Image (spheres, grey):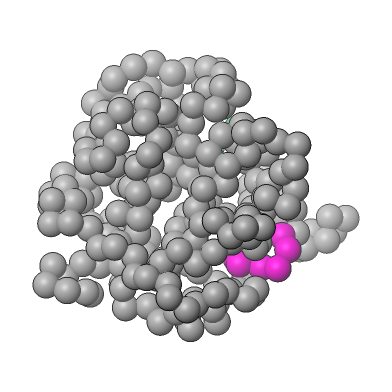
């Protein structure tokens, strides 16, 4: 896809998800979905060796899936409340202040679609760092205003001391919330993606000038992804190039 290493879009997304955890230290990573999971494992093997990985049930795992500890479901709530966690959730909708919806689509009194429900999104965004991964960037996902606030965004987080919506990684780009008003900012555009395409697939305006390219994985990271973490290449089914 890009450069001599023939890096795929999925591999760029995995490295971008690994970078989500780069400065986290010894916290529990809770990546939802294959690409964020590969990113957390890659981070553990490279820049974030203290990261704790969970199987989503009750076991802490090493990067190759080897058991490292026991963390029953009830204790996850203690970890959530103490803020020692970084979750990467999905999003059916995200708006320009980082409000996320995984609950329902349409008017509250008569939704057109019932989705997963708010699940852990309210508690996560009130207590610790939260990021999102969107495998199919579209105007349907990046909306002016979400229909149901599951994960709380910066325009509603006034009283939340530990609110920290970190980044949104999509199949096209990476976003952060580093604007002065904490609105969403295009941080990088994946190699081979035209910034105008990102704008066309987003329902609110974006600043495109001067936006750098998302980094590509290093040769060492590529080797880990391709031979150790995802040798079957399932990543390419989630984010086709
Ligand atoms: C739409 C849209 C849209 C979808 N606009 N229509 C339509 C219009 C689409 C389809 C239909 C379905 C800590 C913690 C927890 C726990 C702990 C506490 C969490 C206890 C665990 C349990 C708990 C949250 C983790 C996630 C969500 C992961 C995803 C989704 C998806 C796709 C977003 C990728 N915008 N969108 N439709 N969970 N899930 O046309 O119509 O709706 O569409 O952290 O839980 O409680 O707390 O979503 O939707 O992060 O990311 O999979 O639902 O699969 O199938 O695309 O085609 O059927 O007509 P989906 P999809 P139709 S943390």
Q: Where does the image place residue 181, in percent across and percent down from the top left?
A: 66, 58
Name the residue at the front extreme. 180
Q: Main secondary structure of the magenta part?
A: loop
Q: Residue 50, located in which quarter of the rendered image?
A: top left
Residue at 16% across, 47% down: 224
Asked if residue 144 lies in the magenta stretch, the reply is yes
Using the image as rendered, state which of residue 29 and residue 211 is in the foreground: 211
Name above or below for residue 149 compared with residue 61.
below
Q: Is residue 213 left or right of residue 93?
A: left
Identify the magenta region.
Answer: 141-146
Q: Where does the image place residue 157, in percent across and percent down from the top left?
A: 72, 43
Let me know if residue 115 appears in the view: no
Let me know if residue 40 appears in the view: yes
Residue at 26% across, 40% down: 47
Q: Residue 97, located in which quarter of the rendered image?
A: bottom right
Using the image as rendered, state which of residue 193 and residue 37 is in the foreground: 193
Using the image as rendered, state which of residue 20 and residue 69 is in the foreground: 20
């Amino acid at each position: 896809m890009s450069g001599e290493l023939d890096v795929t879009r999925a591999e760029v997304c995995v490295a971008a998800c690994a970078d989500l955890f780069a400065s986290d230290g010894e916290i529990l990573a809770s990546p939802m979905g294959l690409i964020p999971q590969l990113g957390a494992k890659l981070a553990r093997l490279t820049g974030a060796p203290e990261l704790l990985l969970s199987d989503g049930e009750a076991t802490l795992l090493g990067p190759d899936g080897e058991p490292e500890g026991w963390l029953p479901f009830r204790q996850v709530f203690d970890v959530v409340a103490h803020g020692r966690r970084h979750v990467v959730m999905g999003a059916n909708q995200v708006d320009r202040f980082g409000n996320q919806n995984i609950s329902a689509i349409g008017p509250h009194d008569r939704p057109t679609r019932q989705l997963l429900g708010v699940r852990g999104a309210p508690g996560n965004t009130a207590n610790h760092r939260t990021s999102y991964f969107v495998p199919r960037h579209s105007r349907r996902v990046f909306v002016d205003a979400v229909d149901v606030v599951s994960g709380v965004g910066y325009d509603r987080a006034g009283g939340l001391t530990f609110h920290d919506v970190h980044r949104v990684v999509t199949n096209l780009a990476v976003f952060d919330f580093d604007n002065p008003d904490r609105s969403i900012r295009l941080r990088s555009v994946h190699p081979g993606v035209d910034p105008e395409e990102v704008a066309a697939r987003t329902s609110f305006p974006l600043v495109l000038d001067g936006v750098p390219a998302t980094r590509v994985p290093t040769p060492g990271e590529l080797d880990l992804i391709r031979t150790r973490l995802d040798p079957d290449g399932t990543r390419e089914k989630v984010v086709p190039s």
